[in-house]
Image: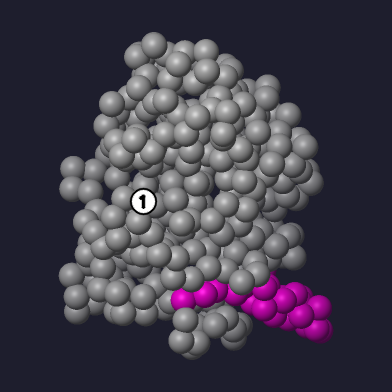
Amino acid sequence: MLILAIETSCDETAVAVIKDGKEILSNLVASQIDLHKEFGGIVPEVAARAHTEKMILLLKKSLSKAEVDLREIDAIAVTFGPGLVGSLLVGLSTAKALAYSLDKKLVAINHIEAHLYAAWLEENSPPKFPALGLVVSGGHTELVLMKDHGKYKLLGATLDDAAGEAFDKVAKLLDLGYPGGPAISKAAEKGNPDRFDLPRPMLKQDNFDFSFAGLKTAVLYLIKNSKVDINKNDLAASFQKAVVDTLVGKTLKAIKKYQPKSFNLGGGVAANLELRKRFVEAIHELPCAVKFYCPPVELCTDNAAIVGANGYFKAKNKEFINWRDLRVDPVAEIK
């Protein structure tokens, strides 16, 4: 089965062609980092316009690279939310037009759910259920128990700032540049992670929710109240360690409670090398057998391949939607 996948939830225009839910025939991404860098964050109107300018060319290139004709596509998968309304509308409009004009089946994809499916791509031995998924991105930090395809239980989510958002804001406080995640990670390589004692938000609470606003504020006051220049590398390393400790600690609690067979890591922050390293070490030391799926960096950041993988299993279960009924949902939740 061939799935044409479209992703425009934020600031990455992405188109992919996926075969049978795991084989990537093409996966192209047009980044907007340079457009938003001067603003220190994403400008929704700028993002939407850039999607409009790049979509058709990227669609043609993706089909050409996959050596697939539009008429050979079995279904079209598109992200409907969560995300920026204007950005989502570009992807949805493209998918709906193609579905109508070519009489193709249409599948609606939740962006957060799609990140969980990075674990199925290019894998000879895909995850087994039940699987625990941690999605860590700029706007979301969520722990999800996957009982089967399409059957989820949300265990916990961020109550305020997501981990990725905290990375961006702390990087701005330290004047390290945009995007914040890679900037913090690079600075942390040269810093002492034990130099500053920062909080691990909600780590000791008996739940699986997250909160990173307090950690960000702690960094802010540390900078404001310091009477000497603070070593940026040391503070970046200490901040990164606090985030990683919290993410790993909460996840291990969930693994011990629910005893999943697999653990899937996804989302843009999953590209953080320290986080990946710590999870490898922590999973290895567990007394129970859990297979850890850590996708390559290009499948952590926003892309359409994960949308296509997710779309394959929905199409297989005939979870189609009429193009007339498909709407943008900027605050869509996993159900």
Query: Residue at 37% across / 19% down in the picture?
Result: 73
> Would residue 129 be visible to someone looking at this image?
yes
Magenta span contains residue 134:
no
- For label 1, the crowd category at 10 Å Cα-Cα, with few meaning under 14, some 14 to 19 and many 20 or more, is some
Give the side of residue 319 with respect to residue 185, left or right: left
Residue 200, position as x, y percentages in the image: 55, 82
Q: Residue at x 45, y 16 (%)?
A: 103
Task: Please tell me which residue lies in front, 172 or 210.
Answer: 210
- Residue at 47% across / 34% down in the picture? 321
Can you say whether 43 is above or below 100 in the image?
below
> Relative to 187, is 297 on the left or the right?
left
Q: Give percent across and percent down for residue 206.
A: 46, 86
Is 12 above or below relative to 128? Answer: above
Q: How many marks?
A: 1
Find residue 69 and report its horizontal and vertical position in percent. Answer: 39, 11
Displayed quadrant of residue 127: bottom left
The answer to which of 249 and 316 lies nearer the viewer is: 316
Give yes or no for residue 220 being in the magenta stretch. Answer: yes
Looking at the image, which residue is at 73% across and 29% down? 49
Question: Would you name the residue on which mark 1 appears?
Answer: 150
Asked if residue 39 is positioned above or below residue 90 in the image, the reply reads below
Q: Secondary structure at mark 1?
A: loop
Q: Kindly tell me whether residue 276 is visible in this rendering.
A: no
Q: Amino acid at mark 1?
A: Gly
Image quarter (top left, top right, bottom left or bottom right) of the N terminus = top left
Q: Is residue 132 left or right of residue 107?
A: left
Q: Which residues are magenta?
A: 208-234
Residue 105, by quadrant, is top left
Above or below, 278 relative to 30: below
- Foreground residue, 307 or 186? 307
